[in-house]
Amino acid sequence: METFTKKARPSLKLAKKTTNGPIVLRLLHVIILFLASIMTGVGDELKPISLPRPELRGGKSLMEAIQLRRTTREFGPEKLSAKELSGVLWAGFGINRPDEGRRTAPSAMNSQEVELYVALVEGLYVYDPKAHQLNPVMTGDFRGKTGQTFSTNAAAVVIYVADLSRLTNAKPETRLFYAGIDTGAISQNVYLYCAAHDLATVVYDLNREPLARAMELKPAQQIILAQALGHPKTNGDSPAQK
């Protein structure tokens, strides 16, 4: 904004010297403010985050991960790398059989109704399993909006949102029940990935209505749970970095 205004100053000085200087000056001010607002919006716009292909080798064995699976509510200051985001989201509910479009976790009648919204510091994204990328939803830090103090210290918060309209083969009164079961399977996959790769995680309940309004969800979209992710806190992490 400041740089743009400096470049426009010669035009403003010229406008003052013309016969209709005040009118032209006001018009230029309006144009400058309009263009500056557009430039600011473009600069702040979220862009899709392409994720690398998940690594199917490495990490601890399944039995070791089950043995190490645990809930952690304290997180270190490090961000999750693209590789870690890729692995945890694919393990949670990625596509493991591309020819059929089948997923890493079960869903009732293969409805695949659960969407993984990912809250990062810079904004809210939704996981696209087909493209294996994070698509932007809106700017703003939604981690703290999930209602737990530890969530603001997490590198990311996954918000599990069920689109109940996809459960067309289920009775309306059982759709939320199925969505809860499916979310449990996904969140356990995330737990096991975190245990296998030395990451910290906790799944938790939350105040759904205000968060749903903030996320501008449709009536058929229901928030089920949230899960905070990050690197475990170490003794060397200072309180200011929590």
Image: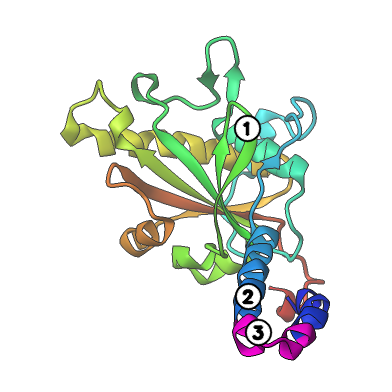
Query: Helix or strand or loop: what does disc 2 sit on?
Result: helix
- Whether the magenta-drawn stretch holds residue 20 is answered as yes
Q: Residue 55: x and y, percent? A: 76, 29
- Left or right, residue 113 beside residue 76: left
First in residue order: circle 3 vs circle 2:
3
Residue type pointed to by label 3: Leu
State how far apart marks 1 and 2 are (Cα).
Answer: 44 Å
Q: Residues within 10 Å of mark 1 (few under 14, many from 20)?
A: many
Q: Is any atom of residue 76 visible in this view?
A: yes
The span shown in magenta is 13-26
Front-most of residues 180 and 145: 145
Q: Position of residue 236 (x, y in %)?
A: 82, 71
Query: What residue sits 25% from the left and 34% below the top?
Result: 175
Residue 90: mark in rendering: 1
**Towards the viewer: 71 or 240:** 240
Measured as percent of width and height from the top left, residue 158 is found at 53, 49
Q: Which residue is disc 3 drawn over?
A: 25
Measuring 66% from the left and 43% from the top, which residue is drawn there?
48
Sequence-first tag of 1 and 3: 3
Q: What's the residue at 72%, 56% (across, down)? A: 231
For marks 1 and 3, give the CA distance: 56 Å
Reply above or below: 115 against 107: below
Q: Which residue is mark 2?
A: 33
